[in-house]
Image (cartoon, rainbow, N blue to C red):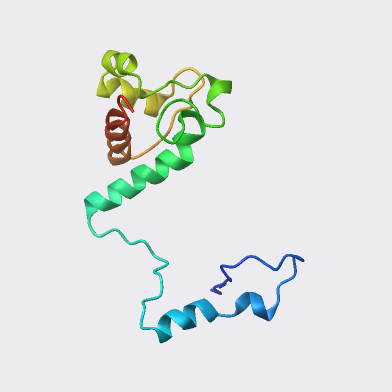
Amino acid sequence: MAALAGCDRPPSPTGEWSPKDHDRVDENSRVQSGAQAPSKSKTPTSPAEEARQLTEMTWQRQCAACHGAVGHGDGPNGPMVKATNLTADEWQAKVSDADIATSIRKGKGQMPKFDLPDSVVGGLVGRIRAMRGR
């Protein structure tokens, strides 16, 4: 099985790759000064941290496009689908955690259903509850 490795830098403004695009001046400077190179892997330190990271990644990839970064319903697609403002006290007071989880799992209105692990659904419910009044 062959593995491909790629450069993490974009090509030059002309769109062509050059040796300069692959230099490691920044990295070499850090090493010479004794600094650690930035870690490319974000390995969670605990199961709780892993669940938090999965929840946040899911929010960013699946929820924020409609509900926005903090849940106001102001994501790029929010007005088009009439996304709920998840921070509103009135909305938070009328839905249970089970209602939120069901909406995530089965969809509601224009919101599609999401087939997610229970730990992620629970994390999203907790994240939504923490948004109240923001």
Residue at left offset 35%, top offset 19%: 88
Looking at the image, which residue sits at the far bottom?
A: 32
Compared with residue 5, is residue 122 higher up or lower down, i.e. above or below?
Answer: above
Question: Is residue 46 left or right of 73 when viewed as pictured?
Answer: left
Compared with residue 119, is residue 44 higher up or lower down, i.e. above or below?
Answer: below
Residue at left offset 64%, top offset 65%: 10
- Quarter of the image where the C terminus is located: top left
Q: x, y (%) of residue 32?
A: 42, 86
Residue at left offset 40%, top offset 70%: 38
Residue at left offset 56%, top offset 73%: 5
Compared with residue 83, is residue 8 higher up or lower down, i.e. above or below?
Answer: below
Looking at the image, which residue sits at the far right?
A: 14
What is the number of callouts on the image?
A: 0
Residue 8 falls in image quadrant = bottom right
Residue 22 falls in image quadrant = bottom right
Q: x, y (%) of residue 117?
A: 33, 40
Residue 3 falls in image quadrant = bottom right
Q: x, y (%) of residue 101?
A: 32, 27
Q: x, y (%) of residue 17?
A: 71, 72
Looking at the image, which residue sits at the far front?
A: 33
> Who is closer to the viewer here, 89 or 62?
89
